[in-house]
Amino acid sequence: MGRGKKSKGKDNGHVNGERKRYKKFEELARDNKNLRKYYQAQKIVSEEEFPEMIEAMRTVLPTNFRISGSRQQATDIRELIMTEFVPHIRDTQIDGVDIEAPHPLPWYPNNFGWQFSIPRMALRKSKELRSFHSFLVTETEIGNISRQEAVSMVPPLFLDVRSDHMVLDMCAAPGSKTAQLIEALHADAAPGTAPTGVVVANDADYKRACMLVHQINRLNSPNIVVTNHSGERFPNILKSNSRDIVQFDRILCDVPCSGDGTTRKNVRVWETWHADDAHSLNPLQIKILQRAAYLLKVGGRLVYSTCSLNPVENEAVVAHVLEHFEGALKLVDVSTQLPELKRRSGLKTWKVMTRDGEMHETSETIGPEVASRSTRKHMEGFFPLPAGRMDELHIEHCMRIYPHLQNTGGFFVAVLEKVAPIGVNERKKAAEALERARQRAAARSSGEETPMQTEDELKRAASEDEGAESKRQKTDEKEDGSAKRAPFLPDSPREDPALRENPFVFLDPNTNKELQAVLDYYGIKDSMSHQGFLSRMENGLFRSVYYVADSVRQLMELAGQRLRVVNTGIKVFGRSTVKEAGCTYRLVCEGVPQLLTHLGDKFVIEMTFSDLRVLIEQVNPLLTQLSDETRRRVEAVDTSCSVIMCYDPAKHVEDNEKPHTRLTALLAIPCWRGAMSVSAHINKNQLRSLNHRVLGRTANTDGVGDLKLENNIHTSASSHADTPAADAQEP
Ligand SMILES: C[S@@+](CC[C@H](N)C(=O)[O-])C[C@H]1O[C@@H](n2cnc3c(N)ncnc32)[C@H](O)[C@@H]1O
């Protein structure tokens, strides 16, 4: 549900001191008189359509997933689903009933969003379906697939994230939309280049922020920072040598909400729903959106979304914030984007329901007996603005997605753009830029080169001038090294005893000999910035080394202690437990995509298809089992050392054997070079996935399949005792 955490003061499972018996899922009535009355009165759909919508809200939601990760990898996974699973499931019948095959969501770009409805009992009765289910579980574990409600995939698509954008996800946990934002940042970068932007994923709830870390770590991005602030109090980060604050190009406000668009998944909403749930959330939602507006650059885009159908949490919030900023924010008409996505326009009129079930058109009819003092304080914000004003603000540009339109949950999305500065500082800066543009235009027209410009042209020139000014500032910082000089103060340890982690510190290879030795050993090239390594110190020692993109480092240096950083970067090196190892640090699985192009050549070893087969089929295969060239290259590195073994499907087409499914993405596998053997240093799910995709061998999570995976896992009991057993359990 959208709220994200239990509201304070709830019963904790007790009523009047006695333990409350929660009804079983199937005992719950999928109905609520007040809910029906409320939405019928709002006329959110026509009278004829209303029963269809309520019926859809009662049915079980289909399963949806998104193919995630890098574009090329995602393409390979999509091909596998289309060629292997869809045709089989399409032909499957259970007890004489056809099973609906998984199908792509028509509006999701590149067929990367999918939907299917397979009854649980059907899974038990069909080998094909069980196999598909196991595939989903495995690929989800390793981050190639994300289970995500279809409508929840919508808001990031309207943010239009580019590779150089500063993006803020205000209420990010558990992180399914953050993952989309990170993917968009990487997908937009030119082939072979890294994005220069940042995604800051923030959540007010520390525990949920930690869940978010788990979700996004699977994407192996060095361009992400996870922070823990109340969105409405997200701190100002000052640019260096300036009183200006860092602002974002894109902001997602997927705010806490009552979640009544999720009745198909959270059946308990039917039992607990009341219209005034929205009343306590509306003031917070307004504050979060207002803060986001301040943090947004002029010309930047913001998406506000909820999984609630209630106008008090949706159009009311948007309308009052637009009104508050007096034209600095405007709603964007996105009706021609994602044309296949069925949606309805935002509401311009609605009524407010109080706890007694009465509907009100104005706050004047609401008495103190049905509204607490704090509710009364905010009541104006629940109602629509005067009719003419709702038209002027184009509230119809908001999007409402209803469950019956395309078999999904319910959702609300509004796309906003900041068209003018807000606040004293921003206005002053804009006025200065306008004056500069005026003076330039005057100078030009006195030289009779160009005629005097119109006010609009001047404003445009001024806003371009501001952009150029901020670019100039960045370049100046680079040139005079001031950004580098800005001292980085680690985020302070939190007061909450549950938050025990040590703060991140950047490691400078010029002064940190241990790091320099690791970089020298692995021949890390200058193409990888040496300033992005950081760690969490434990008793003066660092166990793991992480890496962040320059953009993240600059942001963290500017923010200093102001930003409560929960996590950032990707782990690239882990301290080795093997005493005789060539280097005290080994390569870490999740760091492979980051390190691959920057490692010394001898550590990246190309292999043939038959080498790949040996590596994923056998436990610690002997070096003698590899092809001659591959073996020669592995033997050229120290024993007890990490290497990355790569299979490039584009290069090794001459091999007699071919992968089971069409592969286009390079497969890069971190390995451990033992005295006589080499072993893939990956976890069970990664091994399972490779065996399936490369060799067509399945090892299902429920035991179905022809691969006995237990035998392939590298443990201390494995046949050649020269792999780092402790490391193998945690690659
Ligand atoms: C609807 S959920 C967000 C879902 C998330 N965007 C996703 O796609 O996975 C709302 C989140 O807001 C967080 N939250 C609640 N109050 C907040 C606040 N004042 N500021 C920031 N986050 C808040 C909750 O902890 C919850 O994780």
Image (tube, rainbow, N blue to C red):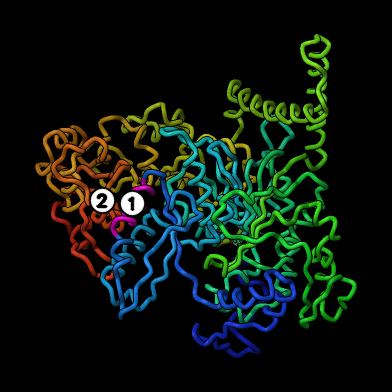
Rendered-image quarter of ligand 1:
bottom right
Q: Where is residue 122 in the image (x, y as percent from the top left)?
A: 34, 76
In the displayed orientation, state which residue is furthest to the left. Answer: 624
Q: Is residue 716 shown in magenta? A: no
Name which residue lies at 61% across and 49% down: 336
Q: Against 594, is 69 above or below? A: below
- Asked whether the beta carbons under mark 1 and mark 2 sit within 8 Å of each other, the answer is yes
Q: Which residue is drawn at 53% across and 60% down?
A: 174
User: Within 8 Å of ligand 1, the CB of disc 1?
Assistant: no
Local secondary structure at mark 2: loop
Q: In this view, does 186 lie to the left or right of 75?
A: right
Sort mark 1 into few (<14), some (14-19) or many (20+) by Cα contacts within 10 Å. Answer: some
Report whether 529 appears left or right of 718.
right
Q: In this view, does 616 lie above or below 46?
A: above
| Residue 446 badge | none
Magenta-colored segment: predominant secondary structure: helix
**Residues drawn in magenta:** 73-84
Residue kind at label 1, given as amino acid type? Glu
Whether the residue under disc 2 has CB within 8 Å of ligand 1:
no
Residue 284 appears left or right of 546: right
- Residue named by callout 2: 661
- Give residue 438's position: percent from left, percent from top: 82, 22
Q: In this view, does 396 lie above or below 262?
A: above
Q: Mark 1 points at which residue?
A: 79
Looking at the picture, how far across and down is residue 193, in whole percent?
Answer: 44, 33
Give how far apart the Cα atoms at labels 1 and 2 are. Answer: 8 Å
Quarter of the image where the N terminus is located: bottom right
Residue 77 sits inside the magenta stretch:
yes
